[in-house]
Amino acid sequence: MHADRTSTTRFPVPVDAALRTAGWQPGRWDIKQAEYWADALRDHVSPAGHRHAVFPAAVEAWAEFGGLHITPSGPGRQLAPATLDLDPMHGLHLARTLGDLGRALATEVCPLGEESDSNALLAIDTEGRVYALDHTGDWYLGATLDHALNTLITGTEPARLTV
């Protein structure tokens, strides 16, 4: 029996379909691009001296999903599905904001990309937990990037972060 292209155990079918349409496939691993982003973020210092934290969970997320532009189709569960641009350079000038969030959470936080429609910054911490920061507050998207992608692509309402 052959599994068809849209079946997977890792992601629900609509999430898998949106990821594959964006160019993701199991085993995708662009470590060269991930290292370029890591260097660019490490080298950036804000005018006030703030620096980005760069750590393995972020580099691994960039290697697998970095550079994807994900445009979900269909309605969301509670919210409109998020259109995503998984380019960490969207957070380049937000080192202080991410540093503040990391201190509040007793971890370090690094940019992942943004929700294109709302301009919410997507960020990941050292444990792989994912957050969104926008003008309305900070949001917890999931304990893993997979969970966060499910939340965003299916339009599931995230939890407001309270610290």
Image (cartoon, grey):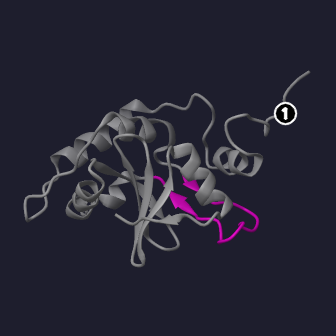
Of 7 and 30, nearer the camera is 7
Considering every residue shown, the one lying at the far left of the view is: 48
In the picture shown, does residue 110 fall above or below 117? above
- Secondary structure, mark 1, is loop
| Quadrant the C terminus occupies | bottom left
Of 99 and 29, nearer the camera is 99
Q: What kind of residue is marked 1?
A: Asp
The magenta segment: 69-86
Q: Is residue 146 left or right of residue 43?
A: right
Magenta residue check for 71 = yes
**Residue 79's quadrant in the figure?**
bottom right
Considering every residue shown, the one lying at the far front of the view is: 163
Residue 94 location (% of width, % of height): 26, 63
Q: Residue at x 51, y 45 (%)?
A: 145
| Quadrant the N terminus occupies | top right
Q: Residue at x 45, y 51 (%)?
A: 130
Q: Residue at x 61, y 43 (%)?
A: 23
